[in-house]
Image (cartoon, grey):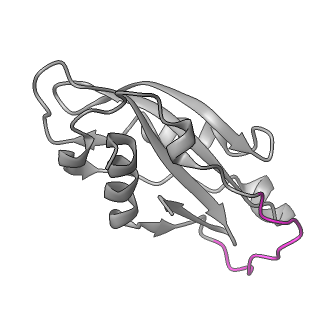
Amino acid sequence: MSAGRSWGILLAGLLVLGGCASNKPFRLNHDYPAPPSIKRLTEAGACQGGEALAARSLPLPKYPLFAKRQGRQGWVVIKLDVLPNGQTSNVTVKQSAPGSIFDRSSIKAVRRWQFAPVGGSGLSNCLVFIDFRLGQVRIGR
């Protein structure tokens, strides 16, 4: 099993749900874009040791209010490094759809993630899938 896939499985196992607080139900107005193959996006040697990551804090991205009001759905694949002390760094968007609607919210949240110290030189080029669907946010698939 590749480290990138292990990372995805780890985060999928956390399966944290959330969303913006609102009294109005989410009204779907747009189709959900087909998600990518994380395996195909993973670079060789990426996130070596990622299967041992232990999350301390994984705040979910906020569902952008304008997107929720418009019934927009989508996803973001974030690329990040985990420093030896467990903090994230070099958080960037690897791919997203539609456009960049959910990018800023995803980056902001992942920058605040904290893992148990990983030691060594940390982990690099880890990928995480963030799903914005039906007015809720989920990590992994």
- In this rendering, is residue 8 above or below 44? below
Q: Nearer the viewer, residue 108 or 117?
A: 117
Find residue 36 and report its horizontal and vertical position in percent: 65, 49
What segment is highlighted magenta in the picture? 22-33
Residue 35 in magenta? no
- In this rendering, is residue 100 above or below 23? above
Q: Main secondary structure of the magenta part?
A: loop
In the image, taking residue 71 as reference, residue 11 lies left or right, namely left
Find residue 4 and report its horizontal and vertical position in percent: 39, 42
Find residue 24 and report its horizontal and vertical position in percent: 74, 79
Furthest residue in direction right, as rendered: 29
Query: Which residue appears at 84% of the width and 66% of the height?
Result: 31
Q: Nearer the viewer, residue 38 or 104?
A: 38
Residue 31 in magenta? yes
Find residue 91 and report its horizontal and vertical position in percent: 47, 27
Query: Which residue appears at 42% of the width and 30% of the height?
Result: 80
Q: Quadrant of residue 23?
A: bottom right
Query: Which residue appears at 34% of the width and 27% of the height?
Result: 45
